[in-house]
Image (cartoon, rainbow, N blue to C red):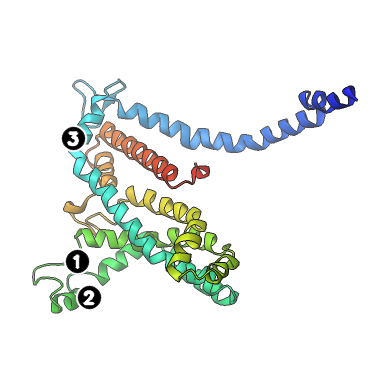
Amino acid sequence: MAITAFAPTIGAGAPSGDTRRGGRTALLLLLPGIAYLALFFLAPLVSLILTSLQTPRLYGDIGQYDYAFRIENYADVVGEYLPQILRSFGYALVATAIALVISYPLAYFIGVALRRYPLAQSLLLVLVIAPFFISFLLRTLAWKQLLSNDSLVVQGLQALSLLGPGEYFIGSPAAVIFGLVYNFVPFMVLPLYASLERLDIRYLEAGSDLYAGAFTTFRTVTLPLSMPGIVSGTLLTFIPAAGDYVNASRDFLGSPDTSMLGNAVEANFLVLQNFPAAAALSIILMAAILVLVAVYVRRSGTDELL
């Protein structure tokens, strides 16, 4: 009996030939993905970090830099572009909150209320993702025309005294946040729908049987069960919104007073040719998003998403 009892343990400690072959097969299948990450993520990241530490070449022209370890580049860009940094995360936070308020009822309606009507669900989902069929730039340019200073929308707002005679919508923080919300709402709706579509209706019926009100049932049953969708949707909205540079650009919905971190990166790379500053701003943006996401996911109790 003792030998029989120890036999499975001995077998488990020594991997069989099939296990080793399975491990090699898994490694071969992973190689393309690892090579892709190394080539298109790790190598550019290392190059970006090295560029952010460069120093201007002595007696060199504009755009000529030498590799160095000038950590002061980070302090310089933070001091120079602090308003753009704060504005980026402020706009992204407000846009994400508005997108969540808009998207949650819509996702609940599609995923729960219309569960018995799959055709209606499919049609509404197509409407949600329909903007993806048009270019991001074209959609933003269309809104610029619709909200231009001479448009009926602005004239109507001025007639209702919501805008002063010399005030306009384009170029304001509200226009930038509006553009962020419009362009990234589908990123919020789809994860919420995927979470709410799997919600077991019997839990809601049990809440009603226990004389819980609609708000109590939502707060104690629906909201916790849909938390993975909320976390995924807010991350998918906040991260690209914080790095966006199209909506805040003066060529689209923004103005120089609404420029975000992405606009500062674009200007330093393409106009000023200050490559170390642009790279340092990119690293700061990436690091800040990673820290904020880690704290948010941990505090929301969905650590498994990390």
Relative depth, front residue between 165 and 54: 165
Alpha carbon separation for disc pair 3 and 1: 30 Å
Q: Are marks 1 and 2 in contact (CB under 8 Å)?
A: yes
- What crowding class fits label 1: few (fewer than 14 Cα within 10 Å), some (14-19), or many (20 or more)? some
Name the mark on residue 169.
Answer: 1
| Amino acid type for the residue under numbered disc 2 | Val
Q: Looking at the picture, how far across and down is residue 123, in whole percent?
A: 53, 74
Q: Amino acid at mark 3?
A: Gly
Asked whether the viewer can see residue 198, the reply is yes
Q: SS of the residue at dot 3? A: helix
Q: Which of the image's four quarters has the N terminus? A: top right
Q: Which mark is residue 221?
A: none
Residue pointed to by mark 3: 79
The secondary element bearing badge 1 is classed as loop
The answer to which of marks 1 and 2 sits earlier in the sequence is 2
Residue 286 coordinates in the image, percent (x, y): 36, 39
Name the one closer to the observer, 295 or 247: 295
Q: Which mark is residue 153?
A: 2
Image height check: is 18 above or below 191?
A: above
Q: Residue 25: name its quadrant.
A: top right
Q: Which residue is drawn at the image coordinates 34% and 52% (left, top)?
A: 241
